[in-house]
Image (cartoon, rainbow, N blue to C red):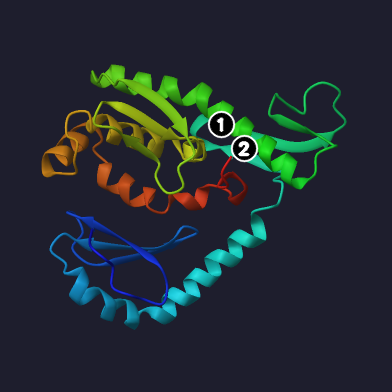
């Protein structure tokens, strides 16, 4: 295992065969450094990080403040772009269900405190994902003649989806917050791994043949976490 050069802030290094330069990304997960495959991490990375340390510190502080300030708020609206749905959120006394959702309105029992309300909303989101994401993947696979072994719906912290070497695909429930075009791109990306379990030129050639806007969609996907509200990013 290669040790990362020491630095004031923790970070994760990701090698990319498509990267031509070093890219720094900051999210609620921390600092991510994307480097070309030929980049010498042990020798060249630390000076670069030191030169950018003021920007890194400022950006990390902004992200952490945004998350801490918004993460515990119960939303008034939930927009599921993947499904073209917009749900209003309210509370009222409920006798049977603790959460009732119908006709674009989510009613939370007024007995809930904020934490309980958010947990209920996240469970509702997962149920929506378990209902709607499998048919989307099945349809995408059928139209392109792919066959996958199985599907699981999870709540990954930093990945939209994954594909195992055995052909099982895992999708992030937060995909429901993305527009349909980006969801389709994620599905196709994972399906292409059924033929190429890597990110080689052959893989990207297959992906481009299925998604002509693959590069544009991939670039947008890097910033798509901003579409996921903070309340939905917490673990279940």
Residue at the image point whose x is 21% and y is 59% from the top: 19
In the picture, residue 195 is in which quadrant?
top left
**Separation of residues labelled 1 and 2 (CA atoms):** 6 Å
Q: Which residue is mark 2?
A: 122
- In the displayed structure, does residue 57 sit left or right of residue 126? left
**Residue 146, placed above or below residue 104:** above
In the image, what residue occupies the spot 22% across and 28% down? 194
Tell me the crowding category of disc 2: few under 14, some 14 to 19, or many 20 or more residues within 10 angstroms, Cα based: many
Dot 1: what SS? helix
On-image quarter of the C terminus: top right
Give percent across and percent down for residue 160.
Answer: 40, 41
- Disc 2 secondary structure class: helix
Give the quarter of the image for residue 106. Answer: top right
Pointer 1 residue: 126
Q: Residue at x 24, y 31 (%)?
A: 165
Q: Quadrant location of the N terminus?
A: bottom left
Estimate the x, y position of residue 140 in percent, counting from the top left.
Answer: 33, 23
Location of residue 70 by image quarter: bottom right
**Few, some or many C-alpha atoms within 10 Å of disc 1 (few <14, some 14-19, many ≥20)?**
many
Residue 41: x and y, percent?
21, 69
The image shows residue 53, relative to residue 23, as above or below, that is below
Q: Is residue 8 left or right of 206 when viewed as pictured?
A: right
Examine the rendered structure and indicate whether residue 55 appears above or below residue 24. Answer: below
């Amino acid at each position: 295992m290669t040790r990362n050069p020491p630095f004031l802030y923790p970070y994760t290094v990701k090698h990319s065969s498509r990267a031509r330069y070093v890219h720094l990304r900051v999210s609620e997960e921390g600092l991510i450094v994307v480097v070309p495959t030929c980049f010498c991490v042990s020798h060249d990375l630390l000076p670069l990080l030191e030169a950018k340390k003021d920007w890194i510190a400022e950006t990390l502080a902004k992200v952490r403040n945004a998350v801490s300030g918004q993460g515990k708020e119960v939303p008034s609206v939930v927009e599921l772009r993947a499904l073209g749905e917009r749900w209003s959120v309210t509370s009222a006394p409920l006798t049977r269900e603790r959460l009732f959702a119908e006709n674009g309105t989510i009613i939370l029992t007024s007995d809930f405190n904020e934490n309980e309300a958010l947990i209920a909303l996240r469970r509702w989101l997962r149920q929506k994902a378990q209902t709607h994401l499998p048919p989307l993947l099945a349809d995408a696979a059928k139209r392109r003649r792919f066959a996958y072994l199985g599907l699981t719906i999870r709540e990954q912290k930093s990945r939209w989806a994954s594909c195992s070497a055995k052909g099982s695909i895992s999708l992030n429930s937060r995909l429901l917050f993305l527009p349909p075009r980006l969801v389709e791109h994620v599905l196709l990306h994972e399906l292409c791994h059924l033929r190429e379990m890597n990110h080689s030129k052959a893989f990207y050639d297959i992906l481009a043949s299925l998604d002509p806007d693959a590069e544009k969609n991939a670039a947008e996907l890097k910033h798509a976490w901003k579409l996921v509200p903070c309340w939905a990013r917490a673990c279940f």
